[in-house]
Image (cartoon, rainbow, N blue to C red):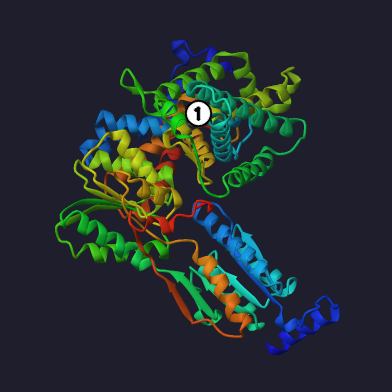
Amino acid sequence: MKPTTSDTKPGAASKPLSARFKGLGPVIALVLLCIAGALLNPDFATLDNMMNVLTRTAFIGIIAVGMTFVIVSGGIDLSVGSMAALIAGSMIVAMNALATGAHPPGPVTIVLAGVALALVFGAIFGALHGFLITHGKIEPFIVTLGTLGIFRAVLTWLSDGGALTLDMTVSETYSPVYYQSILGVPIPVWVFALVAIAGAAVLNRTAFGQHVQAIGSNEQVARYAAIRVDRAKIVTYLLLGVCVGVATILYVPRLGSATPATGLLWELEAIAAVVVGGTSLKGGAGRVLGTVVGAVLLSVIANILNLTSIISEHLNAAVQGVVIIAVAYLQRGRR
Amino acid sequence: MRSMTKIAVATLFALGAAHVSAADKLTIGVAVPTATHGYTAGIVYWANQAKKELEAANPNVKVIVKTAGTPPEQANQVQDLVVVNKINALVILPFDSASLTNPVNQVKNKGVYVTVVDRGLTNPAAQNAYVAGDNAAFGTLAAEYIGKHLNGKGNIVVLRGLPTTVDNDRVNAFNAEIKKYPGIKVLDAKYGNWNRDDAFKVMQDYLTRFKQIDAVWAADDDMEIGVQKAIEQAKRTDIKEIVGGGGAKFAVKKIMDGDKLVQADVSYSPRFMYDAIKMTADARLKGQALPAKTIVPSVLITKENAKQFYFPDSPY
C-alpha cells in the first residue's frame, strides 16, 4: 500500500507511470478493437450497436464486478452461471405461482416480489459459499464446483429439462426493465454503471476494500493485523451472490424464460473479464474498472465477428482466444 | 457370443428369480443423454412414456432408462446394463458417435439386440437397427417453404446450431434447396448454438448489419425465441417470417394461435425415441428383427396440421 501514498510526489512519478501504462493495456486493446470494428463495418460505430453491446455485457459485467472482490481476496467462484440460472428459474416459478394463485396481486407487486427473491437468493447462496469456505475449510474451487453442479441440476429438475416461461401479463410488466431506456441509455447499462462505480468505491476507498486486498496478498499477515479474515471473505462471496441476483433481475425480462442453457459458461466469461482487466488470479490487487473494460472487450470481439464474415464462423473462438492472450501480454509483469 | 447369452439365461434360472420362462422375459436397456435442454428433455420424456406403456401392457417386459451426462458415463451405463441388469435388447441414443461405437459393439457381441437412435455409430456393424430423424429433409423443407413464401425473391439470414454432423447435414440440405431460388440471397449463417440467448445476440447483430431481411431460418425452436425477441426490440418490420425447427410445443402453439412471424416449423420430434423402443420391443417379443434402417420423416408443420404435433404434456 506504501507506493500509493507517495504517488503525488513528482520525483517518484516514473515508476507508477510505467505501471499505469501497463494498466492501460486493456483500454488500448479496446480502443484498437473498436477502430478495427468501425473500419470493417461502419454499422459497428452506431449508437444502436454500442448500446446493444453494452446491454448484453451488463449481465457478465455486473457478475464480474462481484467476481473481482472474490478473486482479489484470493478466492474463486465457479458457480455464478448456474446460480444465475437457478435464481432465474426460481423467480419465474415464484412469480407464476403468484400470478396464477387464488388472489393474484398486481403485476407490479409480483415483479417486485421476484426482484426481492432474486436478491435474497443471491445473498443466501453467496453467504453459504463463504461459510463453507471459511468455516468448513474447503477450497473455494471445490465448494463452487460442487454448487455449480447442484444449482444447474436443481434448475433442470424444476424445468423438467425444458424451459420455464414467465406468465404473459407479468412478462409484459417486467420486460421494460431490460428493453426500456432512460436518457437514451438502456436500463441494464445504467445498472451496470452504478454497480461498477459502487464496486470501485468499495474496493479502493473503504476499510473493507483494503482488507480484501490485504487478505489476497497475504492471508496470514492479514490475520496478524487483526483483520477479521473469515468475515471479510464471507462478505466477498455474499456481494458476488447479490451481483448475480442483480444480473438475473436484468436477464429474466429479456426472454421471459429460463432454460438449462441459461448462464452456461458465464463463470468463465466473468473470470476472463476480471483477469483481462488486470486483476491477478493469485489475488492481492485488482481494479474494478479494469474488469469493466475486460467485460466490454470480450463482447466487442464477439460483436465484430458477428458483424463481419471475413473468417470462417468455426474460428470465432480462436479469434477470441488470440485477443485474450494478446491483452494479457500487454500487461505482463504486473504481478 | 451365443454361449454368453446361454450363461446369462442359465444364471437367471439359477437365481430362481423368474417365474415365467426366462426366454419370454424381455429386458430392454435404454441409454440416452441427460436432459440438459428442451430437446433432450423430450427424449427422456418419450423414453419414459414408452416404458410406462410397454410395462403396463406386458408384465414380461421390463424397460430400464438410464441418462448420462458424458460419453464415458454412457459407456459405463451400457456396461452395467449388460452385466447387472442382464438386458436382452439395448436402445441407445449415443452421446457421441465415435466414442460409443466400441462399447456398443461389445454389447452386441454378447448377443444383445442393439437399436441405435438418431446419431449413427461410426461402425454400422455395431448395431442391429438404426432409427433416425431426417436431417436432410429438415433443411430441405425449411428452404422450400421459405423459397415459396417469398415468391423466390428476398434476403434471408440463417442461424446454425452447434458445429456437429447433424447441423452440417441440415444446413447443407438447406443450401442445396435454396439455390433453386436464384432470387433468394442468404446473407450470412452464424452459430447460435441451439440456445435462446446466443440466438438473441446473433440476431441483434444481423439486424445491425443488414437493413433488409425478409425471412430468418432459425433452424431450431429455441433459437427462434431469441430471434423473435431481437426483432421485437429493434422494432423492425421488414422481416415477414421466422422458420424454426424441431416442433417444440411452444412453437407449435404459436402456429396454432396464428403468430405473425412464426407460421411454419419443421418437425424433428424426440418422439422417435418412443417409436424406437416400441418397435424394438414388438419385434423382439415376436423374435423378429427390425429393418436395418428406419427413417422417421420430417414434416412441415403449418396451421393446418399443427394440432397433431402438439403434445402439451411433453417438456418439448
Residue A12 located left or right of residue B231: right
Foreground pick, A159 / A26: A159
| Label 1 chain ID | A
At mark 1, the secondary structure is helix
Image spot of residue B139 (x, y percent): 32, 62
Residue B273 higher or lower than A325, as above or below: below
The mark tally for this picture is 1
Q: Is residue A60 left or right of residue B158?
A: right
Quarter placement of the N terminus of chain B: bottom right
Q: Residue furthest bottom?
A: B3
Q: Residue B272: give x, y in percent of width and height.
A: 49, 66
In this rendered view, identify the residue nearer to me: B235 or A272: B235
Q: Amino acid at mark 1?
A: Ile
Q: Nearer the viewer, residue B19 or B175?
A: B19
Question: Which residue appears at 30% of the width and 65% of the height?
Answer: B140
Question: Which residue is painted at 58% across and 48% down in the image?
Answer: A160
Q: Residues within 10 Å of mark 1 (few under 14, many from 20)?
A: many
* Residue located at (67% from left, 37% from top): A140
Asked if residue A228 is positioned above or below residue A146 in the image, the reply reads: above
Query: Could you tell me residue A59's position as x and y percent?
Result: 47, 32
The answer to whether residue A251 shows anywhere in this view is yes
Q: Is residue B71 visible?
A: no
> In terms of image quadrants, where is residue A243?
top right
Q: Quadrant of residue B171?
A: bottom left
**What residue did someone put label 1 on?**
A249
Residue A61: x %, y % from top left: 46, 31
Q: Nearer the viewer, residue B190 or B41?
A: B41
Q: Is residue A179 left or right of residue A7?
A: left
